[in-house]
Image (cartoon, grey):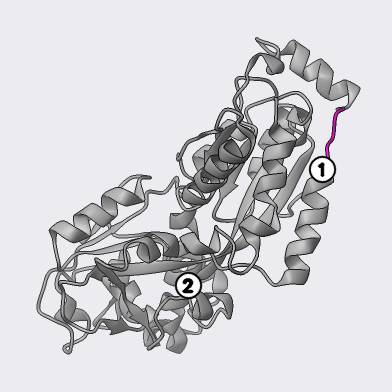
Amino acid sequence: MKLTHITVSALALIAASATVASARDQIRVTGSSTVFPYSQAVAEEFANQTGSPAPIVESVGTGGGFQAFCGGIGEGHPDLTGASRAIKKSEYDLCATNGVTDISEALIGNDGLAMSISRANTYDWDMTLGEMYTALAAQVPVDGEWKDNPYKNWNEINPAFPDVAITVYGPPPTSGTRDAWVEIAMHKGCEQLEFVKAGGFDGDWVEENCSRMRTDGPFIEAGENDNLIVQQLNANSNAMGIFGYSYLYENLDQLKGVKFGGIEPDFDTIAAYDYEVARPLYFYVKNAHRGVIPNLQEFIEEYMSDAALQTGGYLAERGMTPLPEAQRKEYQTSVLGAVNMEAPTE
C-alpha cells in the first residue's frame, strides 16, 4: 500500500520548517540501541532490493530518539524512531507540542534483556533477580535496615558465588534498555527481598526506593553502544554486561547468558515470557513525512513485511523473537495504513 498524500495541516507544518522536507533524499531512523541492529538490517535489505539510498540509522537510545523524533516536522527531524519500550505520555505530549500529531506505532517483536558474561568464565552463573538487585542497586537491606549498598564481591551476595569483584557494564539513564531493566528486573528483584515482603511495601514504595542503580563502582554506565560492552566482557572474563538479547545472540561464540531462576535467555523462553526479563520492541513513524520523504512508505513496507518479521524472517535471524501471527498481521495492517496511534495514558 502506498500513501501519496498528507493533510493540509501537515503540509503547512513542513512548509514552515527551515527547509522543505522533500529536499532530503535519505530516510532518517533514530532511537534505541537495541532496535538499531534490526533497523540497520531492514535498511540494508531495502537498499539491496530497491537500489534506493540506504536510510541513515543512528543509535542514540530510546529517550534520545523520542527527543529527536518529537522535535518537529521537516527534513531536520527523523522519520522513524526505534524504542525498547512504549512511548511515554510526556514524550507523546512533546510531539504534539511540536506539531507531530499523527504517529503510527509498530510493535515488531520481543526481546530479552540479557546479563551476559564471557565464555572464558567457567562458573555456571544462575541467580535470582533478588540477588541481582542486591548486587547492583543503590540501596539494599543491610542488617535489617535500608542502606547504601556496601557489597563489593559476588560471594557477599551469595556464598556459593565466586569471590570476585562485582563488575557489571550497563546502559545509561537515557536508554530504553535501562528503563526496561529497572522496571522489569530491578523492581521484580526488589520485590523478592525478604525485607520488602516482610515490610508489606507496595508498588509505589518499590518504585520510589528500588529504581536507582549504584554509582560507587560495581555498576558501570557504558554508553549507548552495546558493542562496547561486548568488548569489555571479552577483555575481562569476570565482568558482566546488560544489553538486549540480540547482542548476546550475535556473540554466542564468545558470550553466554546468566540464568535467572534457572532459565537462560533464548528464543523460546523470551517468546513465552518464561525468561523473567523480556520486553516488547517498537518503532514509531511520523506519518506527515509519508509521501514527502522519498521511499519512506516503501521502507515501512519492508520493515513490516513477513520476510522481516515472521518466524524464520531475517530479523529473527538477528535475535528478535517474532510476534504471534495474528498480532503481527494486526500491526502490519495499522502501520501500513498509517493509522494514528492512541494517546498513552502514562
Q: Which mark is residue 338?
A: 1
Residue 40 spot, x, y in % from top left: 50, 44
Dominant SS in magenta: loop
Residue 149 position, x and y percent, is 24, 68
User: 318 left or right of 70?
Assistant: left
Which stretch did the figure color magenta? 1-5
| Label 1 SS | loop
Q: Which residue is mark 2?
A: 277
Query: Quick check: is 253 in the magenta stretch?
Result: no
Rendered position, 147 above or below 332:
below
Is residue 341 visible in the rendered image? The answer is: no
Q: Position of residue 77 (x, y in %)?
A: 61, 25
For the point 77% across and 55% down, which residue is it? 332
In the displayed structure, does residue 280 sit left or right of residue 99? left
- Amino acid type at image mark 1: Ala
Q: From the top left corner, tell me how far across and down residue 217 is, in percent.
A: 19, 56
Precedes in sequence: disc 2 or disc 1: 2
Residue sitting nearer the eye, 327 or 67: 327
| Circle number at residue 57 | none
Q: Foreground residue, 84 or 119?
A: 119
Residue drawn at the location 52% of the way across and 71% of the way down: 278
Q: Residue at left 22%, top 80%?
A: 157
Amino acid type of the residue tagged 2 in the rendering: Val
Q: Secondary structure at mark 2?
A: loop
Which quadrant, please, contains the C terminus? bottom right
